[in-house]
Image (tube, grey):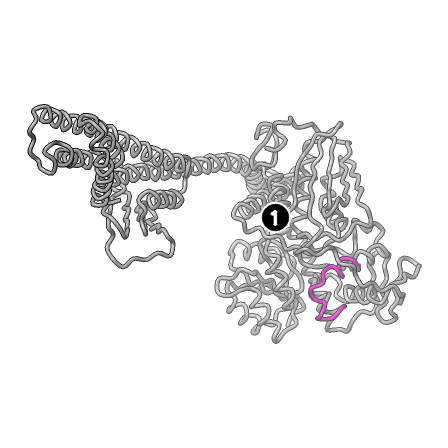
């Protein structure tokens, strides 16, 4: 097996396939493509790609279904590609284990950034967690439960810390409201997005320099949140 | 009262008069008795009509002859004067009867006609202006039932969507109708009226009235159908007009970015432009920007069609308004550099139940509208406050004011005050805002303010009747 990461693209649109293949090959990735969900699943099982780019609208099956079938046996990062306004579908796919999503039309820089984040994240997952996460002036020490802004320690409540720790240990990934609520508050409170809104706001006030225009804890409208950590 | 009883009563009345006169026979003159007899005859004719009157006159003639003309108790007449009296009596009695009777009949006919006219008038008044064929049938059936004293009336209407109107609603009769009349119009039969009634045959007068009713109903039905067809035609015409407006707007709006993309891409491909020159960077940037522009246009059109078809259901959740505004501003930071933004949203604003994404869209559209029209280096101010059970948001800019007559119309789709080819955009932004705010149960309006224009909207603070929740907050530090 070579060192270049292998990316599997499952998308039925020939134009998109062509564009992605050209650009990703140019960036030294190894690329394989499939137009149908079943073919994609077979290719994934045969080639064991390092990353999967998955379109939600496939001719033979729903992308969400492909996502859950993949998650039955592999933790390979999955990036969802979808046309705008299918928040519900994107959330469903993210809840079933996808790592990130991109809305068509997308800029290629954004795609490459997401690909890098996803590949790094999976490397972390394999190589053991990085215990210290930094994002600008913010440092989160997951081992010592310590949060700093610059040199100053930030006092967080229990819930605030749990929230930040979950975001930091999934840096770069999109976390859906439901997954955060389930993880931090427990399954019984999975519908209470208002908790999330309020605590997220407090967290931003304590960490962000301009809480109205956050730089590190980003809102993904209609979907969830994303923590942007340093490279 | 039936004819038979009329005769019996007339006979009894005459017997009574005869009895009285008989008692007074010896004191009264024969001629006076004859005159006195004329009174009951007049009364009978006036009361019961011509035929009983004439019959009574003849009967009285014989009674008079028998009881009061000598020799008594026989029909023989001895004195010539008596013969003259008798003949004069008979002639006068019959003439009176006839005169009174025909006047009576005329009066009765006039009364009947008046009643008919009144009923027709009532019918046509209640049918006036009705556009719904079911209501028309209902009223027609009700009036027919009332004027014919029917037990059960059924109206079957053909039309494009045939239906049957019954009165009473739950009525069901298992025998054939007593009377059936078609509802006829110039174009053919529109339906049928069926009547069941227990007593009496239907008179020719009633039949005539029913036919008139039927033709009134036919007219009303035809008018209603014509009106419906007309309004359908109008809707089609309007949607046709809208379509052409959409097409002209869209073709203009889509062509511009497409032309730019095409020109830039083809010049890059032709090899005329050196890949390393600044020109190529510009061309590539143009392609990128215009593609975003196209994407936005298509998004707007999709949103609008979703609002139009009523599938835009807000996913209302408890949200924080400053967070929504913040994320919009973060996204628009490249476009807002030429203006100063002033955000006055109080920190203690309660959670608001809105769809995050749709609300973002509202702010994006309102802000970009302000940025588009307000001159550079002016202030765009966003403020929010709670008023009763609503949150009231105002977004004011220092751009040009809008003439009062256009104030409501600026939220109409594709409506613009300036010519379409002088401003960019599809003319959909504000109408999308309106659609979203109204789907949230709120209201949106614009107003001129001293130094510019303000957009206002309100959104209810309650979700399914519940006010914003108080959260269980933990305060202890880790």
Percent x, y of residue B446: 67, 34
Q: Is residue A195 magenta?
A: yes
Vertical position of residue B375 compared to residue B200: above or below: above
Q: Quadrant of the C terminus of chain B?
A: bottom right
- Pinpoint residue B381: horizontal percent, then vertical percent: 77, 37
* Image quadrant containing the N terminus of chain B: top left
The residue closer to the viewer here, B368 or B274, is B368
Indicate the secondary structure of the residue bearing disc 1. helix
Q: Can residue B413 be seen in the rendering of this structure?
A: yes
Q: Which residue is mark 1?
A: B439
Per the picture, the main secondary structure of the magenta-coloured stretch is helix
- Above or below: residue A81 compared with residue B126: below
Q: Residue at x 11, y 26 (%)?
A: B82
Residue B49, position as x, y percentages in the image: 23, 35
Whether residue B443 is in magenta: the answer is: no
Would residue B101 be seen by someone viewing this image from the given angle?
no
Give the left or right position of residue B145, taking residue A131 as reference: left
Report the number of numbered marks: 1
The magenta stretch is A185-198
- Hey, which quadrant is residue A77 in on the image? bottom right
Closer-to-camera residue (B259/B73): B73
Residue B264: quarter of image: top right
Left or right: B88, with A125 as reference point: left
Foreground: A153 or A223?
A: A223
Q: Residue furthest right?
A: A152
| Residue at x-position 69% and y-position 27% | B401
Residue at left offset 68%, top offset 43%: B364
For disc 1, the chain is B
Residue B79: x and y in percent read 8, 26
């Amino acid at each position: 097996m070579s060192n270049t990461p292998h990316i599997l693209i499952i998308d039925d649109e020939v134009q998109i396939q062509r564009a992605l293949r050209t650009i990703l090959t140019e960036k030294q990735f190894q690329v394989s493509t499939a137009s149908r969900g079943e073919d994609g699943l077979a290719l994934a099982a045969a080639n064991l790609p390092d990353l999967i780019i998955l379109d939600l609208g496939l001719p033979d099956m729903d992308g969400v279904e492909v996502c859950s079938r993949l998650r039955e046996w592999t933790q390979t990062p999955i990036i969802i590609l979808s046309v705008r306004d299918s928040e519900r579908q994107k959330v469903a796919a993210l809840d079933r284990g996808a790592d990130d999503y991109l809305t068509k039309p997308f800029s290629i820089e954004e795609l490459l950034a997401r690909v890098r984040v996803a590949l790094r994240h999976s490397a972390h997952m394999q190589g053991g967690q990085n215990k210290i996460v930094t994002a600008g002036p913010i440092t989160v020490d997951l081992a010592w439960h310590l949060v700093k802004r610059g040199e100053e320690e930030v006092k967080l409540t229990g819930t605030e810390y749990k929230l930040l720790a979950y975001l930091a240990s999934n840096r770069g990934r999109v976390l859906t409201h439901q997954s955060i609520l389930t993880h931090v508050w427990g399954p019984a409170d999975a519908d209470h997005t208002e908790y999330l809104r309020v605590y997220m706001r407090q967290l931003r006030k304590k960490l962000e320099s301009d809480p109205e225009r956050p730089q590190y804890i980003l809102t993904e409208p209609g979907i969830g949140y994303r923590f942007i950590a340093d490279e | 009262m039936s004819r038979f009883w009329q005769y019996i009563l007339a006979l009894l009345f005459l017997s009574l008069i005869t009895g009285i006169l008989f008692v007074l026979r010896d004191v009264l003159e024969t001629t006076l008795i004859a005159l006195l007899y004329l009174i009951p005859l007049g009364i009978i004719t006036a009361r019961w009509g011509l035929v009983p009157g004439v019959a009574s006159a003849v009967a009285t003639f014989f009674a008079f002859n028998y009881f009061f003309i000598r020799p008594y108790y026989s029909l023989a007449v001895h004195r010539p004067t008596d013969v003259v009296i008798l003949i004069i009596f008979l002639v006068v009695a019959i003439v009176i009867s006839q005169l009174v009777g025909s006047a009576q009949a005329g009066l009765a006919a006039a009364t009947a006609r008046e009643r008919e006219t009144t009923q027709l008038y009532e019918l046509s008044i209640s049918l006036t202006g009705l556009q719904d064929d079911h209501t028309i049938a209902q009223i027609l059936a009700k009036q027919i039932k009332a004027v014919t004293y029917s037990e059960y009336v059924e109206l079957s209407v053909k039309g494009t969507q045939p239906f049957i109107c019954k009165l009473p609603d739950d009525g069901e009769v298992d025998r054939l109708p007593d009377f059936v009349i078609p509802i006829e119009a110039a174009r053919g039969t529109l339906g049928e009226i069926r009547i069941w009634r227990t007593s009496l045959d239907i008179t020719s007068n009633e039949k005539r009235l029913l036919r008139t009713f039927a033709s009134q109903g036919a007219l009303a039905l035809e008018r209603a159908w014509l009106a419906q067809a007309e309004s359908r035609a109008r809707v089609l015409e309007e949607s046709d007009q809208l379509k052409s407006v959409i097409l002209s707007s869209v073709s203009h709006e889509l062509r511009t970015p497409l032309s730019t993309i095409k020109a830039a891409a083809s010049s890059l491909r032709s090899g005329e432009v050196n890949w390393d020159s600044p020109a190529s960077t510009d061309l590539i940037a143009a392609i990128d920007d215009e593609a975003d522009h196209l994407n936005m246009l298509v998004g707007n059109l999709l949103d609008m069609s979703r609002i139009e078809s009523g599938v835009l259901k807000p996913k209302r959740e408890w949200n924080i308004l400053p967070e929504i505004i913040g994320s919009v501003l973060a996204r628009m930071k490249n476009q807002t550099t030429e203006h100063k933004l002033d955000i006055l949203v109080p920190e203690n604003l309660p959670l608001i139940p809105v769809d995050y994404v749709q609300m973002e869209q509202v702010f994006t559209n309102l802000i970009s509208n302000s940025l588009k029209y307000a001159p550079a280096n002016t202030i765009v101010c966003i403020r929010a406050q709670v008023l009763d059970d609503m949150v009231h948001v105002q977004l004011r800019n220092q751009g040009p004011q809008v003439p009062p007559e256009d104030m409501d119309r600026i939220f109409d789709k594709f409506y613009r005050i300036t010519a379409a080819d002088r401003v960019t955009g599809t003319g959909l932004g504000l109408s999308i805002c309106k659609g979203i705010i109204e789907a949230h149960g709120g209201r949106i309006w614009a107003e001129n303010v001293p130094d510019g224009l303000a957009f206002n909207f309100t959104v209810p603070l309650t979700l399914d009747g519940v006010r914003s929740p108080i959260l269980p907050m933990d305060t202890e530090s880790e």
